[in-house]
Amino acid sequence: MTTTSSRLDLVDALRGFAIVSIMLLHNIEHFDLYFTPPGDPAWLKELNQGIWDTMFALFGGKSYAIFALLFGLTFHLQFQSRAERGDDFRPRFAWRMLLLLGFGLVNSAFYHGDILSIYAVLGLALIPVARLRTRTVFLLACFLTLQPFAWIDAIAALGSAPGNLADPPSWAYFGRANEYLKHGSLLDVWIGNLTNGKQGVLLWSWESGRVLQIPALFMFGMLAGRVGLFAVNDANRIVWRRIFFGALLLLGPLLFLCSHLEAWIAADALRRPVDAICTPLLKLDIMLLLVTGFALVYRRAAGQRVLGMFRWLGRMSLTSYMMQSVVGTTLYYGFGFGLYERTGTVLALAIGIVLAVLQGTFSAWWLRHHKQGPLEALWHRLTWIGTARLPATRQAG
């Protein structure tokens, strides 16, 4: 492996890229307050739809997956760093996840789609597998990726009569959320998001397969750290290219399969679990294209100059993620400026780009004067509370 610095610079840049793509998606969604302003001309409606479809094809379900993959990598770096000192990081990691749950609940009050609290709970799955053999962890991660519960549901639904089922249970919660997101006070939003909204997100995470996919991604990230897959060197360039072209070969068949499920399977009872198997695999495949493509471009000097700008946001990912929730919901929700009523996809995307640039500029400025972002520093200090000396920030978290 090359230097730790080269590894972490690529990881920081990739994490920053994920943060920006999440920011753009959240903006065009109005932070889960879906609304299309009436009266737009036909050409603008068509443009809005085209941008919406493109953004979700590229980043929907992929950006969070990049984040999850790097979460597992970070765990490995911390675990390895403490193991070299003769310490077991796992008890401290459990405490670290409890702290992350606290950050996540604060973020959930503003934005019910928060991922931090889910990562905090599912991250505990890394504790029992941290010392297992690489082959064992890889097979377990593959098993979770294949959505075993959806296979059980699909087998049970074989022979079901054609027809539609009722909407998934999460939809009712999201429908109720629209009322307080549009017209509620800040307190109404906080209460609604932490009760109704959180239940809806947890149900949706189960329905979409994320409850199993997230721990699998954590494990894949941990294994990538074990084999040094994010080091910028010639050996990894060959591995990245193989993964990229392998994922590219799988893309066509997966797209074809996922796009034809409705035509092939008339019974909703069967189609839903089959879709819950196929769609996460498609998104995982596109995520691999994004990660390896990013790494291949980053390896070049020109790529590092351009993509390296994302590393400032990546080094302040916790602060950046929570900041975008506070600022974004204030802009779009009824308790703030209520921009959901006046912004279609084009305008919301433009707002997202401006916010990403401002956030990146702030991150670069902050990190020129501080070692970590404000919330990262707080998390780091609380993680290692009770120890005589804090570990180095970038290696041990």
Image (cartoon, rainbow, N blue to C red):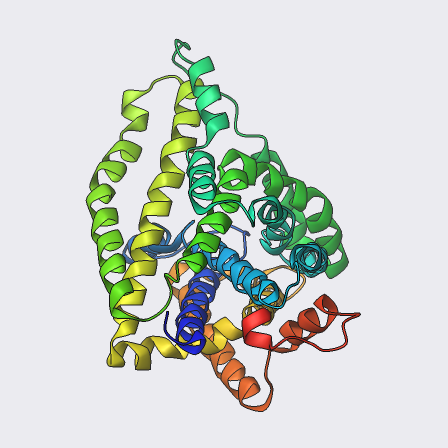
**Point 63% across, 38% down: residue:** 173
Q: How many marks?
A: 0
Q: Assign the N terminus to one quadrant of the image.
A: bottom left
Quadrant assignment for the C terminus: bottom right
Q: Position of residue 198 (x, y in %)?
A: 66, 45
Rendered position, 287 above or below 206: below
Residue 52 locus on image (x, y percent): 36, 54
- How far from the left and from the top, in percent, is residue 197? 65, 45
Q: Residue at x 38, y 65 (%)?
A: 230
Query: Left or right: where does residue 290 sit relative to residue 168?
Result: left
Query: Residue 114, located in which quarter of the rendered image?
Result: bottom right
What residue sits 63% from the left and 48% below the top?
124
Residue 101 in sight here: yes
Residue 143 placement, left or right of 301: right
Residue located at (24% from left, 69% from top): 234
The location of residue 199, given as percent across then percent down, is: 66, 40
Q: Residue furthest front?
A: 86
Determine if residue 164 is in view.
no
Residue situated in front as seen by the camera: 127 or 380: 127
Vertical order, 352 against 136 (above or below): below
**Residue pushed farthest right?**
386
Image-quadrant location for residue 305:
bottom left
